[in-house]
Amino acid sequence: MRGIQNLLVPAALVACLTCQPQSSTPIIYGPWEEGLTLAYEDPSQPQPRRSEERLQVRVARSTLDPGAPRLVQLDLTSIRGRMSVLLRHQDGGIELVEKSGRVLARALPAHFPDLARWADQGIEYRVIGRAAWDGASILPSTSDPVGVWVEARTPQGFLRRTLYLPNLGEVESRLERDNTWVVVNRLVSRGFTDVPLIKRP
């Protein structure tokens, strides 16, 4: 009798764990909170050029569709000017779209990062794995410092690796130059330029 009980207890624990409700909302690997402002620099450039060419990305508008942002408008500002882009979030994927809804490019595929390989506009992508970002000291303590590295290979054979963090998206990108990985884009500040209008449920 005791032998049967010893077998039933682990089986019951496994059954309980598999019956636990799973979150149906995928992690968002992109900025979505209204007012969130991110600044990026290219560390491979010398100063003062590095600071002068800083790129600012601000979440101008975000809409929620049962628990996750559906459409997010980003305003990008640099010394070269200002432009806005519209992103559509769905099932963990991120698409660059026109106001009409036409897809221009796919930043991340649906079911990312579970989908390990995909291609878009001739570029091949693959998930390398998870890692903690070494620049996370600029983030609030509530931010998750562990993200996903993705490698992109162009038809010409150029390689770029990008680390995506939850609720932020790209925080660091590296290019392969002469068999060395060089950081060419890095998040250097995070804050809010105004009070966020929405909060994630």
Image: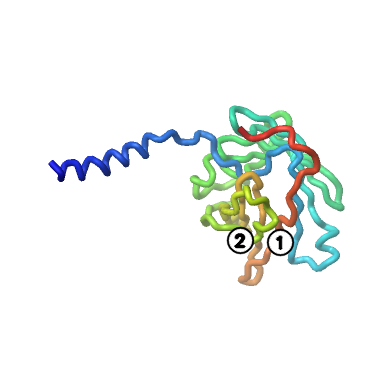
Q: Residue at position x 67%, y 50% from top?
A: 140
The residue furthest front is: 2
The residue furthest left is: 1
Crowd band around label 2 with a 10 angstrom C-alpha radius: few (<14), some (14–19), many (20+): few
Vertical placement of residue 158 versus 110, above or below: below
Residue 79: x, y in percent?
87, 53
Residue 103: x, y in percent?
66, 36
Crowd band around label 1 with a 10 angstrom C-alpha radius: few (<14), some (14–19), many (20+): some
Q: Which mark is residue 157?
A: 2
- Tell me the distance, in whole angstroms, between the alpha carbons under discs 1 and 2: 18 Å
Q: Residue at position x 86%, y 47% from top?
A: 81
Residue 165: x, y in percent?
61, 50
In terms of secondary structure, where does tag 1 sit?
strand
Q: Which mark is residue 184?
A: 1
In the image, what residue type sits under mark 2?
Gly
Q: Residue at position x 63%, y 49% from top?
A: 143
Front residue of 159 and 45:
45
Q: Which mark is residue 46?
A: none
In terms of secondary structure, where does tag 2 sit?
loop
Q: Are marks 1 and 2 in contact (CB under 8 Å)?
A: no
Front residue of 185 and 98:
185
Q: Residue at position x 60%, y 41% from top?
A: 28
The mark nearer the N terminus, 1 or 2, is: 2
Left or right position of 156 against 117:
right
- Quadrant of the rendered image containing residue 88: top right
Left or right position of 11 against 141:
left
Front residue of 126 and 12:
12
- Quadrant of the rendered image containing residue 196: top right
Vertical placement of residue 6 versus 136, above or below: above
Model colouring: rainbow
In the image, what residue type sits under mark 1?
Val
Front residue of 73 and 158:
73
